[in-house]
Amino acid sequence: MHYPATLATGGSPVRNPSLSQWETVTRQAIAVARETGVGAALAGYEQALSIARQLFVAPPPGRAEDCVAALVVSCHNLTDLHIEHGDADAAASYLCRAHETLISLILDADRTASLRQAALRQSRATHLALVSHVAAHGPHPLITRVMRMGCLVLNVDGPTHH
């Protein structure tokens, strides 16, 4: 299945990515943000997202939940960075990308059940982040579109209650 190219932001692919490598890069970016400001942490957060994307596509056996969570955390870290810089639009974009990616994975019958279930569990966090963003920054057209898409996709087989 095709994964949204919109997550292909920043960071170069790494050879033999691992969750420990993702964690190290993420911790380093957080430390840089604390020491020198969030702007200096952008490259680290983008590198962490790049690692998370690679792990998301091919998670190590038994680590599906952790790989999906790494992708979500990476997007949320970049969201927070953009909020700190006053760029609510870019923040909304990262939140939407994460949620869209999870919804796509949930629907991908070619992926393992454990990975799809991990995406479903993590989609709760991305959904809440979208709602929280709207509450804090007002309506955003990307968020409205993604929320509608997610609701339609996840309710397609069940009856609609009014």
Image (spheres, rainbow, N blue to C red):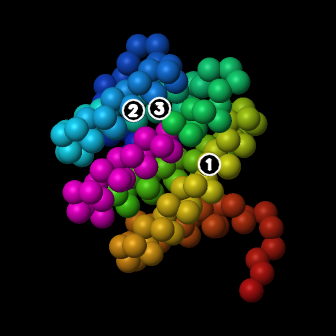
Q: What range is drawn magenta here?
A: 71-88
Q: How many marks?
A: 3
Q: Is the residue under label 1 in contact with that under label 3 (CB below 8 Å)?
A: no
Q: Amino acid at mark 3?
A: Ala
Q: Amino acid at mark 1?
A: Gln
- Which quarter of the figure is the C terminus placed in? bottom right
Q: Nearer the viewer, residue 135 or 114?
A: 135
Q: Is residue 140 above or below residue 106?
A: below
Q: Secondary structure at mark 2?
A: helix
What residue is shown at x 50% (from left), y 61% (from top)?
A: 129
Residue 44 percent location from the top left of the image: 30, 32
**121 on left or right of 88:** right
Residue 92 percent location from the top left of the image: 38, 61
Residue position for label 2: 26
Residue position for label 3: 52
Residue position for label 1: 122
Name the main secondary structure of what is drawn in magenta: helix
Residue 63 percent location from the top left of the image: 65, 27
Residue 47 percent location from the top left of the image: 33, 30
Q: Amino acid at mark 2?
A: Thr
Q: Is the residue under label 2 in contact with that under label 1 (CB below 8 Å)?
A: no
Magenta residue check for 87 = yes
What residue is shown at x 35% (from left), y 53% (from top)?
A: 80
Q: Nearer the viewer, residue 2 or 46?
A: 46
Ranked by sequence position, the earlier of labels 1 and 2 is 2
